[in-house]
Image: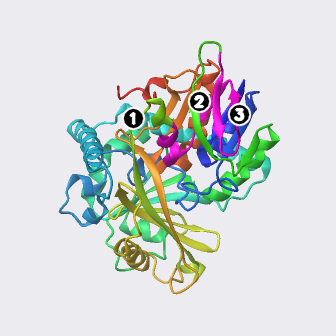
C-alpha cells in the first residue's frame, strides 16, 4: 500500500520503519524541520518497565491513593481550557484506579502495557546492534521507594511484571545505596526495585537514528510539511490529505495519524474525538558536574513521581502533570525538581548555567493504554495516546499496527488498544 504517516516523533518514525520493512510505500509528513521536535524531544527516555513510569497506569501512584502523603504535590494541576473535560478525564482515571485498588491484582491493561514494552525492548536492542547506534543508553533501572507502603501499593504492577517474566530484585535501603553510592544521605529510603534488563536512552537521539533505518528501508520523510486536513476514503476513493501551500490533495491508500497533541485538529473536523487529554510536564537537562555524583542507573523517584537519568554528559530530571491548555511554565514545579535533584543526587549537575528546560505535552487515555488501530473511517488509522510511555512502547505499537493493516495475527489482543473501545 501507499501509506502516509502524519508526525515524525518517536511513534511516527517507529511506525514508518515497521511499515516500510513490511514492504509498503511510506511517506512521513512532519511540520517541523526534523524529527522528534515535540513530545519526543526532552522526555526521560525511560525504556521500561512502563508500569513503573509516573502517570502510566491509573491507581498506582502514592499521590493518587492518599493526597495527604508526601507525594501529593505530584497530583495533576488543573489548567486553563475546558475544565469539564479535565474533570471528566480525572474522574475516569480515578475510577480505573479504584477498580485496580479494589481487586489489588494485575489488570489486562497492565499485561498489555508490559507486552508492548517487551516487544519494543527486543526490537530496539536488535536495531541498535545492527546499526551500531549509540543513543546514550543507560543499563538498568531503579525505582526508589520512600516507604514499605509504597512497595505494597505497587503489588499489582509487580505481579503483572512477574507474570510477564520481567526480572525484578527488591532491595533494602542498604542494598540500594550500595548499587547507587551517590544517593544523598537526606533521601528518605525504604528500599528500591531493580530491573537489570531495563534502562533509558536519549529519546530524541534514538528517534533520529531510527529515522535513518526507516529511510534505508524505503520510507520517505517530507519535513516542514503542515497537514491541514484529512479526507477519508470510501466509494472507490482513496484517503487524501491537504498540505499547506498545495492546491491539490495528496492521495494515499491509508493515512496513519501519529501527530500527538496536534491530532485533534485533524480528527475533530471528521467527527472523531479521541478519548485522550493533554498532560504537560517538564524536562530539565543540566551539565554533569562530576561523574561520581551521578546515578549509575535510570531512576524513578516514586514518592515524588519524578524520573532522573544521566544521558551522556548531562543530567535530566522529568516531572510534572498539568492538565488543560499549555500555560507558562510553573516556577514552583521547576524549583521542586531542582531541590529534589540536589537532595537525591547532590552535586551531580550544574544548575547555575547551561540548563535546558523542556515543557512538553503527552496525550493520555483514561485507562493508560494507547489508541492503536482503525479509526472507524475508511483509510484513517491511529497510533496515539501513549502518555508517559511513548519511548518504551513505540516499537511495540508500530509492530501491532503493521500487523493490523496487513491482516496478520499480532502478539497482543488488538481489542485492548482499539481506538473505539471507549464507545
The range drawn in magenta is 237-266
Q: Residues within 10 Å of mark 1 (few under 14, many from 20)?
A: some
* Disc 3: which residue: 248
Circle nearer the viewer, 3 or 2 = 3
Q: Secondary structure at mark 2?
A: helix
In which quarter of the view is residue 248 placed? top right
In which quarter of the view is residue 41 placed? bottom right
The numbered disc on residue 109 is 1
Cβ atoms under marks 3 and 2 closer than 8 Å: no
Measure the C-alpha gap from mark 1 to mark 2: 17 Å
Q: Residues within 10 Å of mark 3 (few under 14, many from 20)?
A: few
Give the vertical position of 289 relative to 25 (above or below). Answer: below
Render colour scheme: rainbow
- Membership of 62 in magenta stretch: no
Residue drawn at x 34%, y 36% is: 106
Which is nearer the N-term, disc 1 or disc 3?
A: 1
Q: Is residue 29 left or right of residue 288?
A: right
Q: Is residue 166 left or right of residue 21?
A: left
Q: Residues within 10 Å of mark 2 (few under 14, many from 20)?
A: many
Which is nearer the N-term, disc 3 or disc 2?
A: 3
The numbered disc on residue 401 is 2
Image quadrant where one finds the C terminus: top left
Q: Position of residue 122 (x, y in %)?
A: 63, 41
Q: Position of residue 204 (x, y in %)?
A: 63, 57
Amino acid at each position: 500500500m501507499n501509506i502516509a504517516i502524519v508526525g515524525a516523533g518517536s511513534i511516527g518514525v517507529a511506525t514508518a520503519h515497521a511499515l516500510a520493512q513490511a514492504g509498503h510505500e511510506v511517506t512521513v509528513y512532519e511540520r517541523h524541520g526534523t524529527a522528534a521536535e515535540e513530545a519526543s524531544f526532552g522526555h526521560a527516555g525511560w525504556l521500561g518497565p512502563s508500569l513503573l513510569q509516573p502517570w502510566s497506569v491509573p491507581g498506582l501512584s502514592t499521590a493518587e491513593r492518599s493526597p495527604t502523603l508526601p507525594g501529593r504535590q505530584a497530583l495533576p494541576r488543573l489548567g486553563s481550557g475546558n475544565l469539564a473535560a479535565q474533570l471528566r478525564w480525572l474522574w475516569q482515571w480515578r475510577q480505573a484506579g479504584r477498580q485496580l485498588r479494589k481487586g489489588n491484582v494485575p489488570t489486562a491493561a497492565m499485561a498489555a502495557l508490559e507486552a508492548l514494552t517487551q516487544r519494543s525492548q527486543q526490537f530496539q536492542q536488535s536495531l541498535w546492534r545492527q546499526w551500531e547506534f549509540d543513543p546514550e543508553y543507560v543499563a538498568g533501572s531503579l525505582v526508589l521507594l520512600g516507604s514499605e507502603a509504597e512497595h505494597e501499593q505497587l503489588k499489582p504492577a509487580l505481579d503483572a511484571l512477574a507474570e510477564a517474566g520481567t526480572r525484578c530484585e527488591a532491595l533494602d535501603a542498604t542494598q540500594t545505596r550500595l548499587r547507587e553510592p551517590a544517593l544523598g544521605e537526606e533521601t528518605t529510603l525504604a528500599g528500591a526495585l531493580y530491573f537489570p534488563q531495563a534502562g533509558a536512552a536519549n529519546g530524541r537521539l534514538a528517534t533520529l537514528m531510527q529515522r535513518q533505518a526507516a529511510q534505508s528501508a524505503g520510507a520517505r520523510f517530507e519535513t516542514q510539511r503542515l497537514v491541514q486536513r484529512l479526507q477519508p476514503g470510501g466509494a472507490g476513493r482513496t484517503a487524501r490529505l491537504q498540505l499547506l501551500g498545495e492546491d491539490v490533495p495528496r492521495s494515499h491508500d491509508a493515512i496513519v495519524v501519529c501527530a500527538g497533541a496536534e491530532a485533534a485538529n485533524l480528527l475533530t473536523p471528521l467527527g472523531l474525538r479521541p478519548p485522550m487529554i493533554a498532560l504537560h510536564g517538564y524536562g530539565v537537562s543540566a551539565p554533569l558536574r562530576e561523574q561520581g555524583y551521578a546515578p549509575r542507573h535510570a531512576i524513578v523517584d516514586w514518592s515524588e513521581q519524578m524520573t532522573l537519568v544521566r544521558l551522556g554528559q548531562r543530567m535530566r530530571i522529568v516531572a510534572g502533570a498539568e492538565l488543560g491548555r499549555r500555560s507558562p511554565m510553573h516556577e514552583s514545579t521547576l524549583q521542586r525538581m531542582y531541590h529534589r535533584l540536589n537532595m537525591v543526587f547532590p552535586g551531580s549537575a550544574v544548575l547555575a548555567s547551561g540548563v535546558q528546560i523542556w515543557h512538553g505535552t503527552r496525550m493520555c487515555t483514561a485507562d493508560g493504554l494507547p489508541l492503536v488501530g482503525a479509526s472507524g473511517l475508511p483509510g484513517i488509522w491511529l497510533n496515539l495516546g501513549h502518555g508517559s510511555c511513548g519511548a518504551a512502547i513505540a516499537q511495540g505499537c508500530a509492530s501491532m499496527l503493521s500487523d493490523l493493516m496487513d491482516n496478520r495475527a499480532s502478539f497482543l489482543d488488538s481489542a485492548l488498544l482499539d481506538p473505539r473501545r471507549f464507545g
